């Protein structure tokens, strides 16, 4: 599989072996989620969504110790008006929605600390692999802010009382604690980190991109539906899935004890 890349200022975008790796790359600010970085991230995610060759997105960081320190505090405390700040905040919600509607699985490679707004970014993705050194938290309350933009995502991933603890106390969780709380899927030693991320990315890339898109769309759509409506919607999605060539090929390959050849139809 050929490799490709795209140029940005605050992130790096690379594609290889059906995996698009988007690397936050503003180490001087500890990858603060500035308007520019979020805008570039949205552009990269849109590119990945529209590229048929991309089957998986990995969100990573170039900083050895920090995934992202969260929102740009300098901008929050600046003198720009309410309208400008409101517009900037929409970049958070736009990126969260885009990850939900990506149509492709996403993995967060949390080598370092995942703090404040970046916790929302991580929770908007499907899977999180953390190194043992990583920590997770919402320290906004300690500087006179409240994590409004990421609150809904935390409540949808973490139990209510634990979420209250994160929001109100502003303390950090260790990687192991974040795993126990349901934030992180897997914690690995630093030496095994890159291999663990690559292994999961390869496993996801090997699946039918068509069935994965149907499944990902359904995961996003049914999340807040009443149960009866969700069951009706999912029954319709099952009917669509069973009519695809990839579903037929997958079952056929299973019984013939061979690797499936996905057609994307």
Image (spheres, rainbow, N blue to C red):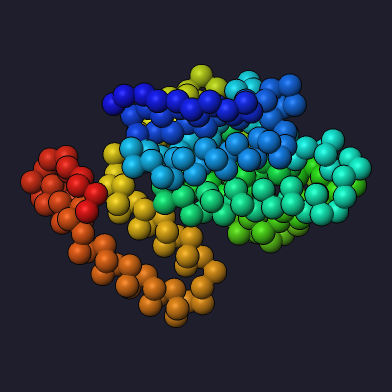
Residue 38 as seen in the image, left or right of residue 143: left
Quarter holding residue 139: top right
Q: Position of residue 30 (x, y in %)?
A: 72, 27
Q: Position of residue 162 (x, y in %)?
A: 70, 54
Residue 164 as seen in the image, left or right of residue 56: right
Residue 224 as seen in the image, left or right of residue 88: left
- Judging depth in this view, the residue of 211 and 12 nearest the camera is 12
Residue drawn 41% across the image and 62% down it: 218
Quadrant housing the N terminus: top left
Residue drawn 51% across the image and 77% down it: 226
Residue 24 as seen in the image, left or right of residue 186: right
51 lies above or below 3: below
Residue drawn 58% across the image and 38% down it: 41
Which residue occupies the extreme bottom position in the image? Answer: 228
So how many labels did they put on this image? 0
- Judging depth in this view, the residue of 114 and 233 nearest the camera is 233
Residue drawn 73% across the image and 21% down it: 28
2 lies above or below 105: above
Q: Is residue 14 visible?
A: yes
- Judging depth in this view, the residue of 195 and 95 nearest the camera is 95
Q: Is residue 198 visible?
A: no
Q: Position of residue 14 (x, y in %)?
A: 46, 27
Q: Position of residue 25 (x, y in %)?
A: 62, 25
Quadrant housing the C terminus: bottom left
Which residue occupies the extreme left position in the image? Answer: 256
């Amino acid at each position: 599989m050929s490799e490709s890349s795209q140029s940005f200022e605050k992130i790096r975008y690379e594609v290889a072996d059906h995996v698009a790796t988007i690397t936050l790359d503003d180490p001087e600010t500890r990858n603060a989620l500035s308007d520019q970085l979020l805008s570039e991230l949205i552009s990269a995610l849109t590119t990945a969504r529209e590229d048929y060759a991309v089957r998986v997105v990995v969100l990573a960081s170039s900083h050895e110790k920090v995934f992202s320190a969260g929102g740009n505090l300098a901008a929050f405390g600046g003198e720009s008006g309410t309208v400008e700040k409101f517009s900037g905040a929409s970049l958070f919600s736009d990126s969260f929605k885009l990850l939900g509607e990506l149509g492709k699985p996403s993995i967060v490679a949390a080598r370092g600390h995942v703090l404040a707004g970046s916790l929302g970014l991580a929770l908007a993705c499907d899977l999180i692999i953390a190194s043992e050194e990583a920590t997770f938290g919402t320290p906004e309350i300690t500087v006179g802010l409240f994590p409004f933009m990421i609150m809904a995502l935390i409540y949808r991933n973490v139990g209510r009382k634990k979420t209250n603890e994160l929001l109100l106390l502003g303390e950090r969780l260790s990687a192991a604690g974040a795993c126990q709380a349901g934030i992180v899927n897997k914690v690995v030693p630093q030496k095994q980190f890159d291999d663990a991320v690559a292994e999961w990315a390869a496993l996801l890339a090997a699946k039918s991109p068509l069935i994965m898109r149907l499944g990902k769309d359904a995961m996003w759509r049914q999340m807040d539906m009443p149960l009866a409506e969700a069951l009706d919607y999912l029954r319709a999605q099952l009917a669509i899935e069973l009519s695809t060539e990839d579903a037929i090929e997958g079952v056929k390959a299973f019984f013939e004890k061979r690797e499936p050849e996905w057609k994307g139809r």
